[in-house]
Image (spheres, rainbow, N blue to C red):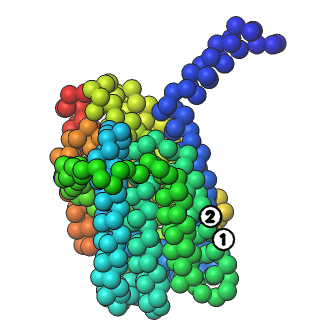
Amino acid sequence: RPIPERILGSMRERIRLLALNKFFSSSVIMIIGTNVVNVFNYIYHFLMGRMLGPSSYGELASLISIVGLLFIIPSSFGLAITRMVATEAKDKHVKRALNKIIYLAIIFSFCFSLIFFATVPVISNYLKISNIWSVVFAGLFFTFSMVGFVYKSILQGLFRFSRFISSTIGETAVKLFLGVFLVNLGYGSFGALGAIFVGAALGLFLAKYWVGDFLKVDKEENFNRKYLKELFLFSVPVTIYTIAQTSLFSADLILVKHFFPNFEAGLYAALSSLGKIILFGAGPVVFVMFPMISQKYSNKEKYSKIFLLSLGFTILVCLSLLALFYFVPSYVIRYSVGSSYLGAAGILFLFGVFMSLISISNLLINLQLAIKRTKVVIFPSLAAIAQIIFINYYHSSMQEVIFISISISSVLLATLIIYSLSKKW
């Protein structure tokens, strides 16, 4: 029976209104684009896991986690830059401040990399990595990525989500194809990390290109330092939060690499990467929500609708992937990282629960930061410290390690819900 024209017309109108909704359309762009990036990333990990084997893949994963910890600095400033651009993009003084920040980022990343290179022997020894050049490449990757992160944060603040995702897709595609090529030539984890470094260089170039003329200002114009001051003041609590957030999903991997044999550490690394599908799947929603709520709060407009839509999207992503991890864990592992990792299939769902709790907590924390309630960073900081302490003392099995993470993230989420409900909206 054909659908009446009246119902069809109503459906078309609803679709049109959704398409015109900035949050919805931006979220769709970011979700689709991020899923393309995630596909490239997981093909990369899938192939690296098979081509390198558990021991060498464990080295690669631990170094990627180290780089993730290094990203604490650019990530924290990135959130502050995004908020500043979203709320005051038309102010020419802001553009002057952004140019100054890019210059400082170049200087800082170079100096930080020199310090990192000096610690290469220590890192290699702690993580039991024989090829120290792999660690060197991890440092070079950080140098390029930090400056690129500033440009990407500007794109986020300008709501240029399609351009942001274009630069990220280009970076990830190079990492994948060049990584496979170099590992095939016999360069091992060194070649895999080299591909990540080249991809970061391309990502920087594309992000700078997409920012375009936005940063062009009259050189004779006076420079107002208040924006730099505000940026650094906001970045302090955000840095604390970024350290805590990164630690919550990276410290366990590093500690497992230290305490467990290479083979078991490789199993844990592979399942941890699969569990992060949930974290990365929900990430685009937070990415779109943060600058939009920042702008509405600055303009004294209501923002509860955007948050509730974000919460709904996040929960939907978490439940969908958790169902997959619960009902067909062996299938997911076999066709993602390979049959060599099936021995730990029983804890894939647990990784999913952990990452779901972190994803929802991340949404609540970003809401509070968008409206300048920076004291919220105390809660994830305490959770991160507790996770490290408990895993250091209790690590008899991989199950025990992941149960510790789940317990701590559950307490964190409950605390954030109570804190959010106690505040005025």
Q: Which residue is mark 1?
A: 177
Kind of element beneath mark 2? helix
Residue 312 spot, x, y in % from top left: 45, 33
Q: Amino acid at mark 1?
A: Phe
Of residues 135 and 416, which is closer to you in this image?
A: 135
Q: Amino acid at mark 2?
A: Ala
Position of the C terminus by quadrant: top left
Residue 321 spot, x, y in % from top left: 54, 48
Q: Are marks 2 and 1 in contact (CB under 8 Å)?
A: yes
The residue positioned 47% from the left and 50% from the top of the image is 213
In the displayed structure, 15 sits above or below 65; it is above
Of residues 18 and 83, which is closer to you in this image?
A: 83
Residue 379 spot, x, y in % from top left: 21, 50
Q: Is residue 27 visible?
A: yes
Indicate left or right for 414 with 154 as reference.
left
Kind of element beneath mark 1? helix
How many marks the image carries: the answer is: 2
